[in-house]
Amino acid sequence: MITRVDHIGIACRDLAASIAFYERTYGFSVFHQEVNEQQGVKEAMLRINGTDDGGSTYLQLLEPLHAESPIAKFLERNGEGVHHVAFGTADVVAETEAITGTGVRALYEQPRHGTFGSSINFLHPKDCQGILTELVQSPVHE
Ligand code: V0V
Ligand code: CO
């Protein structure tokens, strides 16, 4: 079951400048920062609100680590903007299986490492109304 909007992923060229925009414009603050080599990103999570499943909703600001990063490719094509939407679930394997059973393609056979030690998978944007969709099982609650 999907129980929250976990995060909205936003592609940016300059993480520090993007963080500064969200801080001064909306008063959001950085909850966590991380480099994820496997995903080719330097990222910041800005916490917005708690959710009734005990989790939270964040903005995830994503700067490419190198030219082969999916974020670099996205920036080249589209410029800065919304890159993906992530839904939270207590069981990413079961949720991915349930969704692929409806004919939607998952990008990975097995979940991979996401922010805060979460387990993540992605659903193909061409099967999801044009939106790259992520599924997240997060160990962090609050
Ligand atoms: C590509 N397309 C998108 C898209 N990226 N549509 C919507 N949103 C996006 N972000 C479209 C693209 O315009 C093409 O449409 C079509 O999909 C297939 O494109 P492609 O050239 O074949 O594929 P690529 O090379 O653009 O790759 C797209 C995928 C790639 C989604 C396969 O970006 C990927 O593997 N993403 C998953 C990993 C990721 O994004 N990591 C960064 C976030 P047309 O032209 O055919 O109409 S890491 C993260 O969120 C973490 C760590 C976390 O939350 O913890
Ligand atoms: Co994400």
Image (cartoon, rainbow, N blue to C red):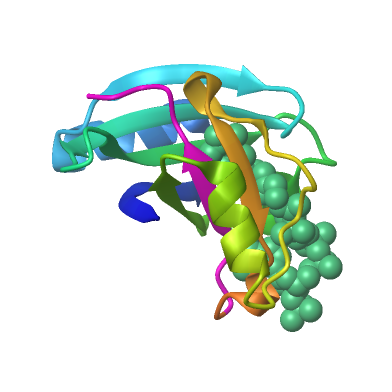
Using the image, determine if residue 75 lies above or below residue 105.
above
On-image quarter of the C terminus: top left
Q: Is residue 63 left or right of residue 68?
A: left
Predominant secondary structure in magenta?
loop
**Residue at point 71% right, 59% down?**
106
**Residue at point 80% right, 47% down?**
109
Residue 78 visible to the viewer: no
Q: Is residue 137 magenta?
A: yes
Q: Is residue 43 left or right of residue 110?
A: left
**Residue at point 72% right, 29% down?**
65
Instruction: Tell which residue pokes out farthest to the right in this image.
Output: 68
Using the image, determine if residue 84 lies above or below residue 125.
above
Q: Magenta span covers which residues?
A: 130-142
Q: Position of residue 110 (x, y in %)?
A: 75, 40
On-image quarter of the N terminus: bottom left
Q: Is residue 125 magenta?
A: no
**Residue at point 64% right, 46% down?**
121
Q: Position of residue 136 (x, y in %)?
A: 50, 41
Q: Nearer the viewer, residue 64 or 39?
A: 39
Q: Position of residue 132 (x, y in %)?
A: 59, 63
Q: Is residue 126 left or right of residue 45?
A: right
Q: Nearer the viewer, residue 142 or 37?
A: 142
Q: Position of residue 17 (x, y in %)?
A: 42, 32
Q: Is residue 142 left or right of residue 69?
A: left
Using the image, determine if residue 50 lies above or below residue 103.
above
- Asked which quadrant contains residue 140, the reply is top left
Using the image, determine if residue 3 lies above or below residue 57.
below
- Asked which quadrant contains residue 77, the reply is bottom right
In the image, ligand 1 is in what quadrant?
Answer: bottom right
Question: How many numbered marks are there?
Answer: 0
Residue 57 visible to the viewer: yes
